[in-house]
Image (cartoon, grey):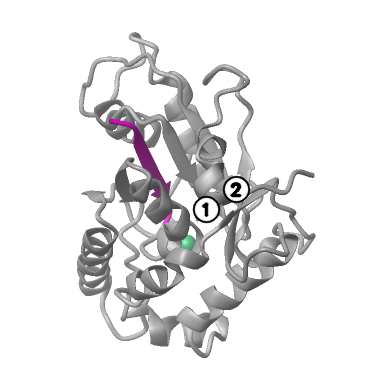
C-alpha cells in the first residue's frame, strides 16, 4: 500500500496547512500518518506546560483519528525543535518504520523557526533513511524506496521577511473542506490561544480564508492547499511526483 507521512512542528499545523491534501490521498488509497515534533506545551496562558502538552496531545490524537491517520507521538516541546543529530535520528526512526512514498512538511521559508527547522530535520532524516551507517533512534534497518518531499506553502503565504511565497502547485480541497474544518475543531484549546497570540477571531474561519486565498491561483475551486516540491536529487527519480500522479481526480496544478 502507498503511504503518506505528514510531519510538522505543532499540533494543529497539519490541520491548518495540509489536512485537505492528506484526506484526498487517503481517499485515493494511501495509508496516512500523522506526527508533530512538539507536543505544543506552550500554547496556553492558563494551563501549565505539562497540562498543555497533555491536552494538546489528546487533541492531536483525536484529530488523527478523525483523519483516519496513524498517530506518531511527539519527541519534544515548543521552541525546542533544534537541528540536532538526536532529532534527525528520532525522526528517521519513524520514517524508516513507515517507509512512505510521500512526505508532507513545512516550507523552509516559514515565519518561525520551529516550522523551518522541522523542515530541515525532515529533509535530512529522509535523505539518510537509506544509509545503513546512520543509525536511527530507535534502531530501525535502513530502507531503500523512492520518496518525494512536498513543502506546504508557508503559513500566511509569506516568508519571515513578509515576502510573498507562491505555491508551485495547488490541490483543490473543496470536496473535503468540511471534513478539514471538523478536524481542526479538535484543537479546541487553541481557539482562545490563537485569538490572544495571533489575533484570530476564529481559527477555523482563518484557515478557510487562507485556503480561499490559495485557491485564487485557480478559477476552478474556492478552497485549496499550496505546495512546493522538494528537489528530487538524492530522494527519487526526477519524474517521481506521486501527488501529481493522482491529479486527474483531485489536483488542479498551476505551474509557475
Ligand atoms: Zn506551528
Mark 2 or mark 1, which is nearer the start of the sequence?
A: 2
Task: Give the residue displayed 40% in from the left and 87% down from the top.
Answer: 192
Circle on res. 107: 2
Residue stretch rendered in magenta on the structure? 1-9
The quadrant of the rendering that contains the C terminus is top right
Mark 1: C-beta under 8 Å from nearest atom of ligand 1: yes
How many numbered callouts?
2
Please state the horizontal and vertical placement of residue 139, each as a whole percent of the image: 21, 22
Please state the horizontal and vertical placement of residue 123, each as a whole percent of the image: 51, 32
The quadrant of the rendering that contains the N terminus is top left
Q: Is residue 218 visible?
A: yes
Q: Nearer the viewer, residue 150 or 94?
A: 150
Which quarter of the figure has residue 126?
top left
Q: CA distance from mark 1 to mark 2?
A: 7 Å
Determine contact: label 1, label 2, CB under 8 Å. yes
Please state the horizontal and vertical placement of residue 221, each as a whole percent of the image: 63, 66
For label 2, count other residues whose C-alpha is less than 10 Å away and answer few (under 14), some (14-19) or many (20+).
many
Task: Give the residue displayed 44% in from the left and 35% down from the top.
Answer: 102
Circle on res. 115: 1
Amino acid at each position: 500500500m502507498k503511504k503518506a507521512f505528514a510531519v510538522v512542528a505543532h499540533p494543529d499545523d497539519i490541520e491548518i496547512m495540509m489536512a485537505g491534501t492528506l484526506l484526498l490521498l487517503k481517499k485515493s488509497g494511501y495509508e496516512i500518518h500523522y506526527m508533530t515534533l512538539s507536543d505544543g506545551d506552550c500554547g496556553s496562558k492558563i494551563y501549565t506546560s505539562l497540562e498543555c502538552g497533555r491536552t494538546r496531545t489528546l487533541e492531536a490524537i483525536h484529530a488523527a483519528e478523525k483523519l483516519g491517520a496513524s498517530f506518531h507521538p511527539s519527541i519534544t516541546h515548543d521552541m525546542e525543535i533544534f537541528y540536532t543529530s538526536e532529532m534527525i535520528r528520532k525522526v528517521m526512526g519513524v520514517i524508516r518504520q513507515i517507509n512512505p512514498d510521500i512526505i508532507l512538511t513545512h516550507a523552509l521559508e516559514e515565519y518561525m523557526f520551529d516550522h523551518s527547522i522541522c523542515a530541515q530535520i525532515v529533509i535530512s532524516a529522509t535523505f539518510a533513511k537509506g544509509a545503513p551507517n546512520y543509525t536511527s533512534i530507535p534502531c530501525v534497518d535502513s530502507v531503500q524506496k523512492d520518496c518525494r518531499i512536498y513543502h506546504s506553502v508557508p503559513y500566511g503565504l509569506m516568508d519571515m521577511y513578509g515576502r510573498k511565497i507562491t505555491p508551485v502547485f495547488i490541490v483543490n480541497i473543496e470536496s473535503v473542506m468540511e471534513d478539514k474544518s471538523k478536524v481542526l475543531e479538535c484543537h479546541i484549546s487553541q481557539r482562545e490561544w490563537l485569538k490572544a497570540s495571533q489575533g484570530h477571531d476564529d481559527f477555523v474561519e482563518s484557515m478557510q480564508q487562507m485556503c480561499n486565498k490559495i485557491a485564487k491561483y485557480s478559477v476552478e475551486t474556492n478552497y485549496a492547499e499550496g505546495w512546493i516540491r522538494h528537489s528530487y536529487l538524492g530522494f527519487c527519480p526526477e519524474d517521481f511526483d506521486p501527488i501529481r500522479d493522482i491529479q486527474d481526480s483531485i489536483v488542479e496544478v498551476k505551474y509557475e
